Amino acid sequence: MLKKTIFCIFVVFCFFGGLYSCDPKSEARLQIWLDHITVPGEENVQFLTIETDPDREWTVTVDPSNDWCFVEPSSGMGNEMAIITCLENDSEYNRTATITTTLKNSNGTKASVYLTQSPLATLDVSGAIFTGSAASTLTFDVKTQAYWSAVITAGEDFCWVTSPSTGEGDGSFNVAFEAYNGTSSRNANLRITGVRQEINLTLTQGFSATRPPQDIPQRIELPEVKNTRWFVQHKYYAMEYDTAQRHTVWVAYVFNDAYNQKNVSRTNKWAFDVIIPPQFQSLNSTSQTFAAWGYDRGHLVASDDRVFSDSANWETFYYTNMSPQTGTAYGLNQGVWATLEALVRKWAQAADCDTLYVVTGGAINPGVEVIGTIPERNNVTIPKYYYKALVKRKGDDFTGIAWWLENKIYPTRAITTYENAMTIRELEQKTGINFFPNLKYVFPGNPNLEEEVETVMNTSRWPL
């Protein structure tokens, strides 16, 4: 009798209160949409339109919850507009949020929309900044998600931006130079402006081919420099450059507490070296050219070795710091060379190291076999071997080791043995390079320090 009474009350309630809200099988009306499903990286606001029956209560949720996308109000009744706020996207990638509206007492009726936010409108410009004295044109590539413009702000009497000088998104533009008969170089300033950034480049015409006077510092990490080559001192590393082969002989740099910091990410600021004259640099140091021959652009100074500042990382992307290393996952660049680079950083941060002195390069000296050159492509030398010479210092204690790796495909990325390790003296015999001649000057009372460090390999000090 009690069950029948309850059932009758339920029927009466549904009749007078509305079958739509009582019957779990009734269909609830719900439609939602956004002003835009893709928004820019800057902080922005847009509206979520909700259309449903006047007596329907609803809630709005965002997944991932309250991370960068927020909704207000998050609950309500009937037709309404909710405000969607997106915070600034300072990452390098798109991000997507799922915005879901759910009706109450409607058997779980819900609708979702997806909102994608682009990264901030970053601006990246690449291209040669040197040209010869003949009438010529330089091409610059622009990468951005927004509008950009290019203009010459100094030197407009002899060079100018040709069409297009503006654009939206990725694109390119040219800078034309008139012929020049001067005896010294002249400079122009190129300004590229984006939504949030401005890049100023100095363009040089008629750069002198004369090698500057070579004042070689007496620092521990510097090898002996051949007088026929260029010694280049960048801010955060030094190098010796062979102009005939358009390839760096070695790069030398240090690790210590200041340089071991990780404060920035990889910048990918590919560019021509600002010190080496353009006629001595390869014009085919692009990833496409290297890839066509089965090689990666391998760093000599690794990008991850200079992440304590943006300017330090930029220097690692000069084309003179690139060398053709075998590609693919088990090639030298992405395999054992990357593993060795990680070991170097590990050794630099070990408790038994105050300073780590690093010399690395591709073996291109006379007498050392090279794979050859890329025909008609500015004589890009492809070393058959790559090397690292390392000296670790802890107070007055010094120890050394060297590595010699063939430029080939390997069966594994791991380095588990010292098969490719040797003394620094053995590496000197292979390359013809005198790696650490300034060790003899560290302690006036011990001129044999160079000999002691370079002829002994204590693997216990270099754990794998």
Image (cartoon, rainbow, N blue to C red):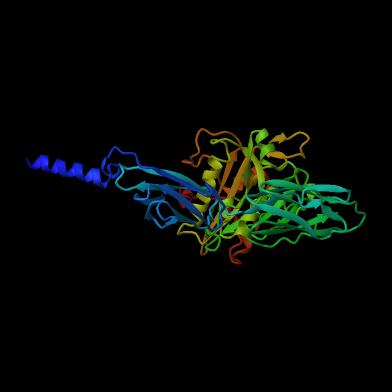
Pick the residue in front: 164 or 378: 164
Residue ranking furthest to the front: 16
Q: In terms of image quadrants, where is residue 329?
A: top right
Q: Nearer the viewer, residue 318 or 179?
A: 179
The picture places residue 138, in percent across and down from the top left corner, at: 79, 48
Residue 338 picture location, percent across and down? 54, 44
Which residue: 81% across, 49% down?
162
Q: Quick check: 181 left or right of 40?
A: right
157 left or right of 143 in image: right
* In the image, farthest residue toward the left: 1
Residue 313: where, in percent of width, then height?
61, 55
Residue projecting furthest to the right: 181
**Quadrant of the image occupied by residue 18:** top left
Residue for point 76% across, 39% down: 379
- Residue drawn at x 65%, y 53% is 123
Q: Quadrant of the N terminus?
A: top left
- Of residues 436 and 50, the one nearer the viewer is 50
Residue 420 shows up from this direction: no
Residue 122 shows in this picture: yes
In percent of width and height, residue 392 lies at 53, 56
Q: Quadrant of residue 70?
A: bottom left
Q: How many marks?
A: 0
68 to 332, vertically: above or below: below
Q: Residue furthest bottom?
A: 444
Nearer to us in this view, 333 or 146:
146
- Residue name at image x 60 percent, y 58 percent: 310
